[in-house]
Image (cartoon, helix red, strand yellow):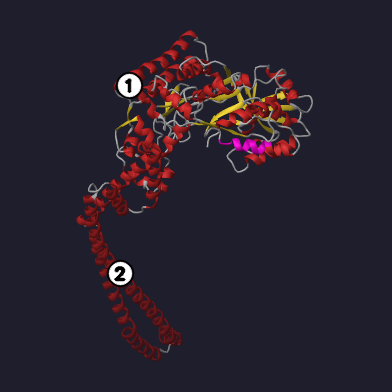
Amino acid sequence: MPMLALGQTVFWDEPMKAVLWGPLAELMPQTTMLLGVMDTDYFSRPPATVQGRGEYKILPHNDYSTKELWVATGELSRLFGSETIPSREQYVQHGVQLELLARTAPEGRRAFLDRVTEAWGWTGLVNTGSRRLLAGDVPLADVLPALIAQLEWGLGGTTECLVGEARQRANQQAQVILGWVRAYADLHPNAKLVNLYLDIGPRIYGLLLGHPPDRVQTILSSELFRFNRSTAERPRFRILDLFLRPETAQIARAAYDDAVHGSEIYTLDRFGDGAIPFDLVVPGHGRGTIHITPGRVVVDADEPLYLKADTPITSAAHLAEVVERSLGNRVALIGKAVTLVAMCGAEHVVVFNETGSSYVWRTEKMASAIVRRGCPLPLYPILRLQYPTWDVIGATGVQIQLPEHLAATFGVARIAAEELGRRWRAVCAEQEELLQTLARIRGPRGTLAFLEQRQPGQWQDAIAEFDRLHQTLIAARERIDALKAKTQQLYASARALKQESELLAREKGRDYRATVAPLREQLWMALSRGDHAQAELLRARISAEEERRASTFDERWIELRRRIRDIEGEIARTRAERRSVETALEVREARSGLMELSCKAQAAKLELVRNAILTSRGLRATCNRPTAWWLPLLSPDGAWFRAVANGTKAYLEPLSPQVPATCAADLQPQLCKCKGD
């Protein structure tokens, strides 16, 4: 029964599946391994922050300027490198004041955030053109200079980790790999990038095994999933048929939507009317979701395609007729994530590493729901491989110059491979525990105390200086608080006097209306009659009232205003005194000193968090998915690979309640013996 290893690039972990050669030769000597290269995915795209005119660039991945980087077909890691990103959110979760450090960073905010959130030892090869390219459409000649530069970076960075003869041997192996690439490009000037991968893949297998691999075939995904009238009846398109036949379409659609619910994978309604979870891949044009609509089939590519259908599409064979009539027989049909795994599992045992394709369980959920409704869907199980990559690196017998983050967490700059293999799991556990501790620490003083605890004597002076400066600010704060309290009391007194002034003004108004206003009315009437004697009497009375009012109201008003002015003057003096305290040289220096110490402590905390994430999560990621060519570079004699192969645990993961008859009779009883403890 053929086994399938399908990947986007041969320069990552795909060739590690060569560990199966020994067990397969012993248990199933007739089994063929199909090495597939995904040429039906879109090639890597840069984020909007990276501009270009279609050239190929090598980019790092970080959580700032290249946050939206998407890489397929062009990723590469040097020894210990992985796409492990210490994200901004992770820093904040672990108590790092990232924005404070970014604002004060000498290199500038962007450069700082790019640097501290960058995935160490990893790069992606992208195309900067405005139009998306399928991986299968990328000319090797166009991408070759960037690919060579990327390989030289990764291979060179790996050899730099070695010393003495080990480095020389690694350099020789690196030149072999580069020589393969250059030689193929010279011999095939019109080849595509994926054609190079088809050629290089078996060579890396041979480099690992020590001999050319037998019982191996290479294939492009566009060939594997070629869709036309002559291929539509193959078992790999059975899942497609279920989505098209009227009697099973609703069952399949409901099972798919339920399987992807709650994930980032779209349910079918989000793709639009008539969508099914499959893409049509058209060379030179792109790929897009297939929509089955009345009278036509729509391929929702960047430039949509409209295929005329005279009658409703009711089967995979019928769809193949429509597609071939309009687009020819070279197109491919490929499932979306969940359905892709079902297509692969219909005819092959698909080989994954321990962490590959995390949505496989959703495929099993979909398949189980379909089978429960009475629709046959036999699928081979997945074969998972669990590598002991770092546990057995001691087989290399080399000395390794550790990168900065690992040197910090292992406590040594150079380490014997045997010691690395013995300690790495414990170091990862220590770093995870450290992350939990760092998340609980709050405040600069707490951070300084923790740093002093980790490095006795190195932070003692900083703590003493922090405490001295802090006391200076406390004393200033006490004085400032006292002046603030005094100011508030003065404001309260001023408000009370102003309220009293307002009450006095209203009382004066009422008195005027009660005493003076009537007399003025009488005076006007007397003058109107010509009664001058009466008018004089009234003028005298009015004058007497005004004198009374002046002594009763005006003198009090003047006194109140004077007191208010005095208080306002005192407020101004108090505020000036407070500002003087706040801006005193001693206080300014204390604030500046505390900020400097806080930034220093935060920077140290950031390094601890970054090193811990890169170590604990990076080493685990690379143990599960090691770059295959690391092994022959560090161990040209094959000892490391043999140790990995001998220690690899394999187990089966079901995709469907139904399995093909050959699986039940042949594969399952044998390979299940390899299942890990």
The picture places residue 2, in percent across and down from the top left corner, at 62, 22
- 370 or 226, which is in the foreground? 370
For badge 2, the amino acid type reads: Ala
Q: Which SS class for mark 1?
A: helix
Q: Earlier in the sequence, mark 2 or mark 1?
A: 1
Residue 328 relative to residue 672: left or right: right
Q: Is residue 205 magenta?
A: no
* Kind of element beneath mark 2: helix
How many residues crowd mark 1 within 10 Å: few (<14), some (14–19), many (20+)? many
| Distance CA(mark 2)–CA(mark 1) | 72 Å
Q: Amino acid at mark 1?
A: Arg
| Corner quadrant of residue 506 | bottom left
Q: Residue at x 37, y 25 (%)?
A: 396
Answer whether labels 2 and 1 touch (C-beta < 8 Å): no
Magenta span of residues: 358-367
Residue 200 at x, y percent in the picture: 49, 16
Residue 501 seen by the camera = yes
Q: Which mark is residue 182?
A: none
The magenta stretch spans residue 362: yes
Front-most of 397 and 401? 397
Furthest residue to the top? Answer: 187
Q: Which residue is mark 2?
A: 485
The residue to which callout 1 is attached is 167
Q: Residue at x 74, y 30 (%)?
A: 244
Q: Main secondary structure of the magenta part?
A: helix
Within 10 Å of the Cα at label 2, are there few (<14), some (14-19), or many (20+) other Cα atoms? few
Q: Percent position (x, y) of residue 535? A: 39, 88
| Badge nearest the viewer, 2 or 1 | 1
Above or below residue 503? Residue 640 is above
Looking at the image, which is closer to me, 343 or 74? 343
Quarter of the image for residue 284 reads top right
Residue 127 appears in view: no
